[in-house]
Amino acid sequence: MSPSEPTSGTPVRTLEQRLDALRRANDVRSQRARLKKDLKKGATKIDEILAAPPEFIKTAKVIDLLLAVPNCGKVKSTKVLNHCRISPNKTVGGLSERQRRELVTFFRP
């Protein structure tokens, strides 16, 4: 089987579909990068993002967002996740209401 032939579990996609998927993925990455910059500058608050996450951030890992918050490095982010009983692999969209509420409460002034 050559590398260009689809495997039995892989759906066949046209070039247009692949390019559209790449375009959407690039848009999501750009929006996430912009959000992380805003978090770093303090223009956006993490508690607001976690309380009502935009669609493009729902598949991002929570720890990646926490690392963008000022004064919240790897150690503090891990402690916050452990305190809230959240796995480091958890995505924003995968948070339960309890987990979301605890995180929001933790970052509210």
Image (spheres, grey):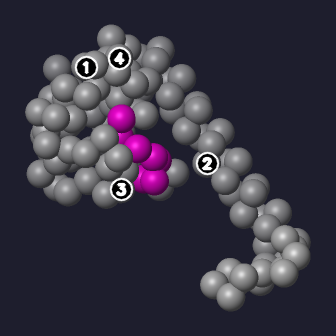
Q: Distance between the residues labelled 1 and 4?
A: 6 Å
Q: Name the residue under label 1.
A: 76
Name the residue beneath numbered marker 4.
73
Say whether disc 4 or disc 3 marks the residue closer to the N-terminus: 4
- Give SS at disc 3: loop
Q: Which residue is drawn at 27% across and 33% down?
A: 47
Is residue 43 or residue 86 the one in the foreground? 86
Label 4: few (<14), some or many (≥20) within 10 Å?
Answer: few
Displayed quadrant of residue 65: top left
What are the residue bounds of the magenta stretch? Answer: 57-63
Horizontal and vertical percent position of residue 99: 17, 48
Which amino acid type is shown beneath numbered disc 2?
Val
Residue drawn at x 35%, y 47% as measured from the top left: 89
Is residue 102 left or right of 88 when viewed as pictured?
A: left
| Amino acid type for the residue under numbered disc 4 | Gly
Q: Where in the figure is residue 6, as x and y percent of width and height?
A: 78, 81
Q: Is residue 59 magenta?
A: yes
Q: Is residue 16 visible?
A: no
Q: How far apart are marks 2 and 4 (CA)?
A: 24 Å
Q: Which quarter shows the N terminus?
A: bottom right
- Residue picked out by circle 2: 28
Left or right, 9 with respect to 17, comes to: left
- Identify the residue position indicated by label 3 in the image: 93
Q: Which of marks 4 and 3 is in front?
A: 4
The CA span between labels 4 and 3 is 22 Å
- Provide residue 68's location: percent of width, then percent of height: 43, 24
Residue 55 horizontal/vertical position (percent): 47, 55
CA–CA distance in space, label 3 to label 2: 14 Å
